[in-house]
């Protein structure tokens, strides 16, 4: 009976994820919001909230009614499908060495040829020289002189400035996180 409810993963911005109820679709964002709003509800309150949230999708509601699927059963199925569709997220923090290696690896691949070992050896030989150190210091000093430093203390490498509204919103979000 609830096999008529399924999940179709989207591929991007133009092809969004949807829940299929029979052949009718409901955007995954609508179901996610619905499930968040139904936490702790049961009985008539759950039914009323369910129908109100999906009033823009009458065809899907008709399919559910035709299959005699109650809102409580539909919510359970949506929750189960939502858990299946979400990939496991690793909360492991990446070390500074790994991040730096990934960053420099892209540049090494664009500049040097050969096997990975040969490329890294050539890169290390190049950056360990005194002439490289002098040039790097000169470039960084020029960046600092022309572009200044960011609010976080990093030397900026371009003269671009951020969107003031976005910067204010970001500052506000960071301030609320600290509380």
Image: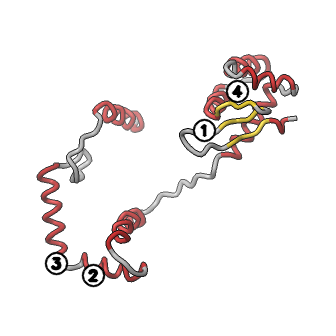
3 vs 1, front mark: 1
Could you tell me which residue is drawn at 69 percent across and 44 percent down? 83
**Residue position for label 2:** 125
**Residue position for label 1:** 16
State the CA–CA distance, disc 2 to disc 4: 63 Å
State the CA–CA distance, disc 2 to disc 1: 48 Å
Specify which label sits upstream in the sequence, 3 or 1.
1
Specify which label sits upstream in the sequence, 1 or 4.
1
Could you tell me which residue is drawn at 79 percent across and 27 percent down? 72
Specify which label sits upstream in the sequence, 2 or 3.
2
Up the image or down, 129 lies above or below 56; here it is: below
**Residue position for label 3:** 130
**Residue position for label 4:** 40
Q: Quadrant of the N terminus?
A: top right
Could you tell me which residue is drawn at 84 percent across and 35 percent down? 2
2 vs 1, front mark: 1
Q: Is residue 110 left or right of residue 138?
A: right
**In which image quadrant can residue 117 be found?**
bottom left
User: Callout 1: 10 Å neighbours few (<14), some, many (20+)?
Assistant: few
């Amino acid at each position: 009976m609830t096999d008529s409810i399924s999940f179709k993963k989207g591929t991007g911005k133009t092809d969004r994820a949807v829940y299929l109820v029979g052949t009718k679709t409901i955007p995954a964002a609508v179901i996610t919001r619905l499930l968040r709003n139904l936490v702790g509800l049961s009985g008539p309150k759950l039914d009323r909230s369910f129908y109100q949230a999906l009033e823009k999708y009458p065809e899907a509601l008709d399919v559910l009614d035709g299959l005699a699927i109650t809102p409580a059963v539909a919510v359970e199925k949506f929750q189960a499908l939502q858990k299946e569709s979400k990939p496991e997220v690793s909360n492991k923090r990446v070390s500074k060495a790994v991040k730096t290696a990934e960053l420099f690896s892209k540049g090494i691949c664009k500049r040097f040829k050969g096997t990975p070992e040969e490329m890294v050896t050539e890169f290390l030989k190049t950056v360990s020289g005194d002439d490289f150190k002098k040039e790097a210091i000169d470039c960084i000093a020029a960046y600092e002189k022309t572009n200044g430093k960011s609010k976080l203390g990093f030397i900026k490498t371009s003269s671009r400035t951020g969107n003031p509204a976005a910067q204010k919103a970001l500052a506000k979000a960071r301030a609320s996180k600290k509380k």
